[in-house]
Amino acid sequence: MTICRASVFTATSKSIALASNLGEPSESVWVPNTDVLISESDLVIKVELAGITKEDIELIAEDNRLIIQGHRSDCCREENKNCTFLIMEISYGSFKTELEIPTEFDLSKATASYLNGFLKIIVPKKEKCSSKNHIIPIKADE
């Protein structure tokens, strides 16, 4: 397996909000950890979304862009209103990431699954048009 930083796709909206004060997490948009790989036939996108139900995730295909957005509820803060957090590394609130999909992949045929906190999106390569000549059979009129 080869791991490299190639410009296969462009990720935008990569802004992670920092807490303004200790124990006071920010409610702005966060970006989930994402892996993108290319196999022989597909572009595979894997997004880490632990603690989120699939109903709270939205996938939007727009031209050659894939938008992944949703919301992770912060039930922990509400359950511990009278506590002071010493460490709070988990992001809550709205999340969003946008990926520009290379033109050789067919975003209209993408499929998605969600299991154990990971969203997996598979975008197949476009079928190549055959530029070879072929014979068209002629049927006899009856």
Image (cartoon, rainbow, N blue to C red):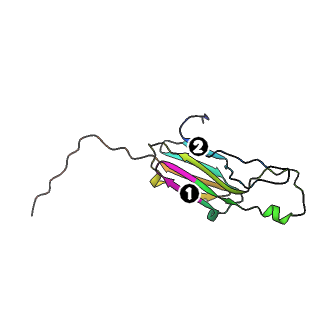
- Residue 126: horizontal and vertical position, in percent? 41, 46
The prevailing secondary structure element of the residues shown in magenta is: strand
Kindly report the distance in space between the C-alpha atoms of the residues bearing marks 1 and 2: 15 Å
Q: Amino acid at mark 2?
A: Ala
Question: Is residue 115 a member of the stretch shown in magenta?
Answer: no
The residue segment tinted magenta is: 58-67
Q: Which residue appears at 31% of the width and 43% of the height? A: 130
- Residue 87: horizontal and vertical position, in percent? 85, 50
Which of the 4 image quarters holds residue 118?
A: bottom right
- Residue 9: horizontal and vertical position, in percent? 54, 40
Q: Which residue appears at 86% of the width and 64% of the height? A: 81
Q: Which residue appears at 87% of the width and 54% of the height? A: 85
Residue underneath mark 2: 11
Question: Is residue 66 a member of the stretch shown in magenta?
Answer: yes
Q: In which quadrant of the rendered image does the N terminus lie?
A: top right
Question: Which of the numbered marks, if any, corresponds to residue 122?
Answer: none
Q: Amino acid at mark 1?
A: Leu
Q: Closer to the N terminus: mark 1 or mark 2?
A: 2
Q: In which quadrant of the rendered image does the C terminus lie?
A: bottom left
Position of 74 relative to 21 (above/below): below
Position of 5 relative to 11 (above/below): above
Query: Circles 1 and 2: CB distance less than 8 Å?
Result: no
Q: Is residue 142 left or right of residue 97?
A: left
Q: Name the one closer to the observer, 113 or 68.
A: 68
- Residue 19: horizontal and vertical position, in percent? 79, 49
Secondary structure under badge 1? strand
Which of the 4 image quarters holds residue 3?
A: top right
Secondary structure under badge 2? strand
Label 2 Cα crowd, 10 Å radius (few <14 / some 14-19 / many 20+): some
Residue underneath mark 1: 59
